[in-house]
């Protein structure tokens, strides 16, 4: 129970910190903290406390893992998600914990970043909610052989990695543009993320004043960053873009997003694996801009399997695969 002098969450037996506190859905809070006596004996603990100051997970709380570098957000389903790096390997890991203190993902945590090869380390992590189902998006500063760069990764509510292995780079990291740091992030309201960071790329040019700049970028819900992706026909990219649907696989609904750079007639069609047209979703003139449409497979009596959707806008034509998994 609450008391005039406060209540002891963890005793004086070891060093503590940092500590995070976030609200739960019952007017209480989750507490997540690091404690340990030396670099190789650092543990992550968590405790749930109710509105009356009563601990819900015993007097000691639960131990999540050996590690440090924590960041925490609630999962909107009565629990929370925390990031950490194990002290023995420093890979980036994430764990989801429910209201009873059970681990919902791999017991060691889901690895969203492997420190190997040209990936030399990571810091300045940010975590935001991807949706209200327990999915999250992570943004961090990656130390590469070209210098610091900003990356992002998405994890769904089941602990599945959704974007590229080791994350999506938010901007090119050419030899003369290596310095990106200190990211801040927020949801784009559509399953993606908008990130802003400090950028030192002009420092490599001795003819300019060496001030930092602020850059911003959006990663769409399917993990696409247009300016970073390799596009074979760049002149067509200037006219239109067809993005990968999300979610994929899906059942029964998914969202298809596209953008066109100038006004024109647009068609968006869905085909089966034999090339037979199932439905024309769009067949109309459109203003320049970004569009999103929901496809509901249950309306067409489709069975599980591979399908295709195709966008035509002027001379631009692009086809992508998607999978219905019932």
Image (cartoon, grey):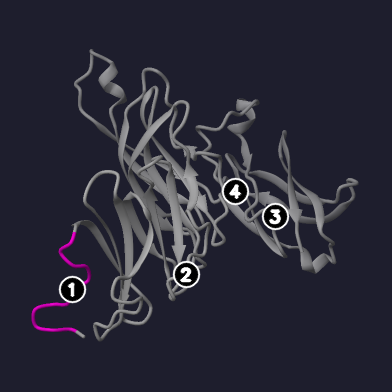
**Badge 1: residue crowd in 10 Å (few <14, some 14–19, many ≥20):** few
**Residue at label 2?**
102
Task: Between residue 243 and residue 303, name the one nearer to us.
Answer: 303
Is residue 9 part of the magenta span, yes or no? yes
Q: Residue furthest left?
A: 5
Sequence-earlier tag: 4 or 2:
2
Q: Secondary structure at mark 4?
A: loop
Query: What is the distance, in whole Å, between disc 4 and disc 3 at their CAs?
Result: 30 Å
Magenta-drawn segment: 2-13
Is tag 2's residue or tag 1's residue first in the polypeptide sequence?
Answer: 1
| Residue of label 1 | 8
The residue singled out by tag 3 in the image is 249
Q: Residue 271: horizontal and vertical position, in percent?
A: 83, 50
**Distance (Cα) linking label 4 and label 2:** 50 Å
Between tags 3 and 1, which lies in front?
1
Q: Nearer the viewer, mark 3 or mark 2?
A: 2
Residue drawn at point x = 38 percent, y = 78 percent = 25
* Tag 4 residue: 287
First in sequence: mark 4 vs mark 1: 1
Quarter of the image with the N terminus in it? bottom left
User: At 32% across and 70% down in the image, what residue appears?
Assistant: 61
Asked if labels 1 and 2 touch by Cβ distance under 8 angstroms, the answer is no
Q: Nearer the viewer, residue 256 or 170?
A: 170
CA–CA distance in space, label 4 to label 1? 61 Å
Q: Residues within 10 Å of mark 2 (few under 14, many from 20)?
A: few
Residue contact at pointers 4 and 2, CB within 8 angstroms: no
Residue 213, percent from left and from top = 27, 33
Q: SS at mark 2?
A: loop
Res 256 visible: yes
């Amino acid at each position: 129970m609450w008391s005039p002098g406060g209540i002891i969450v963890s005793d004086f037996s070891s060093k503590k910190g940092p500590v995070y506190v976030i609200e739960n859905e019952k007017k209480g809070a989750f507490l997540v903290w690091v404690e340990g006596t030396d670099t190789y004996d650092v543990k992550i603990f968590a405790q749930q406390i109710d509105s009356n100051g009563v601990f819900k997970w015993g007097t000691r709380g639960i131990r999540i893992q050996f590690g440090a570098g924590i960041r925490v957000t609630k999962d909107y389903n009565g629990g929370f998600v925390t990031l950490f790096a194990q002290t023995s390997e420093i890979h980036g890991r994430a764990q989801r914990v429910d209201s009873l203190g059970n681990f919902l993902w791999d017991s060691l945590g889901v690895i969203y970043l492997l420190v190997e090869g040209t990936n030399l380390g990571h810091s300045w992590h940010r975590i935001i909610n991807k949706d209200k189902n327990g999915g999250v998006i992570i943004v961090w500063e990656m130390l590469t052989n070209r210098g610091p760069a900003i990356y992002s990764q998405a994890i769904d509510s089941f602990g599945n990695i959704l974007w590229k292995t080791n994350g999506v780079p938010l901007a090119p990291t050419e030899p003369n543009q290596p310095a990106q740091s200190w990211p801040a992030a927020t949801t784009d309201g559509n399953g993606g993320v908008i990130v802003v960071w400090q950028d030192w790329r002009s420092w490599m040019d001795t003819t300019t004043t060496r001030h930092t700049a602020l850059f911003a970028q959006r990663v769409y819900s399917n993990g696409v960053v247009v300016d970073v992706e390799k596009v074979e026909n760049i002149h067509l990219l200037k006219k239109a873009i067809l993005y990968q649907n999300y979610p994929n696989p899906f059942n029964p609904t998914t969202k298809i997003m596209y953008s066109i750079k100038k006004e024109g007639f647009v068609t968006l069609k869905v085909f089966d694996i034999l090339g037979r047209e199932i439905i024309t979703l769009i067949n109309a003139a459109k203003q320049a801009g970004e569009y999103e449409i929901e496809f509901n497979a249950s309306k067409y009596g489709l069975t599980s399997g591979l399908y295709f959707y195709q966008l035509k806008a002027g001379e631009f034509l692009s086809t992508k695969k998607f999978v219905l998994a019932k």
